[in-house]
């Protein structure tokens, strides 16, 4: 993944992530488990269902330490089975 995060942000910084995935009770737990591996911390996600209830968005703020760290988070979160989009 080739991004310009290093030109746009001063690291370390707080970055808001929105992870959208299948409406399943396991989605927030899977996201938090992934984050504990790559960015350990105490997270309190905000979960919002889609209008039809088929999807949920999980929003949270993560301390990101570098361009590579941010790219890793996007890659690893996107690879989760229930996740469809990471913003």
Image: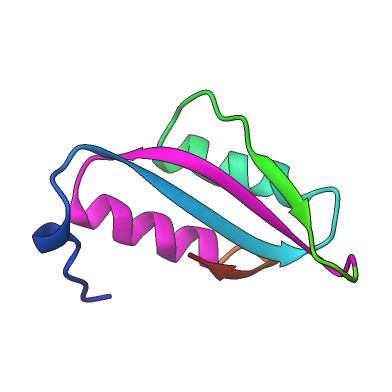
Is residue 84 in the magenta section? Answer: no
Camera-nearest residue between 65 and 59: 59
Counting from the top left corner in percent of width and height, residue 49 is at 81, 57
Q: Residue at x 63, y 38 (%)?
A: 45
Is residue 11 shown left or right of residue 25? left
Image quarter in which the N terminus is found:
bottom left
Closer-to-camera residue (21/46): 46
The magenta segment: 53-78
**Quadrant position of residue 44:** top right
Q: Position of residue 42 (x, y in %)?
A: 53, 23
Residue appearing at x 46%, y 26% in the figure: 41
Q: How many marks do you count on the picture?
A: 0
Q: Is residue 4 above or below residue 19?
A: below
Position of 70 relative to 39 (above/below): below
Residue found at x 67% / y 48%: 30
Is the residue 56 above or below the residue 29 in the image? below
- Front-most of 55 and 31? 55
Q: Is residue 33 left or right of residue 73?
A: right
Q: Residue 75: x and y, percent?
A: 42, 65
User: Given the current orientation, which residue lies at the most extreme right position?
Assistant: 52
Residue drawn where x is 56% and y is 30% of the image: 43
Q: Position of residue 8 (x, y in %)?
A: 15, 60
Direction top: furthest residue:
42
Q: Is residue 42 left or right of residue 80?
A: left
Task: Place residue 32 in its image quadrant.
Answer: top right
């Amino acid at each position: 993944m080739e991004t310009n995060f290093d030109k746009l942000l001063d690291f370390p910084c707080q970055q808001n992530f929105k992870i959208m995935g299948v409406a399943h009770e396991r989605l927030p737990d899977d996201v938090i488990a992934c984050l504990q591996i790559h960015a350990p911390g105490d997270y309190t996600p905000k979960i919002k269902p889609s209008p039809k209830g088929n999807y949920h968005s999980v929003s949270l703020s993560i301390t990101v330490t570098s361009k590579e760290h941010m790219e890793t988070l996007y890659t690893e979160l996107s690879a989760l089975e229930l996740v469809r989009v990471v913003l």
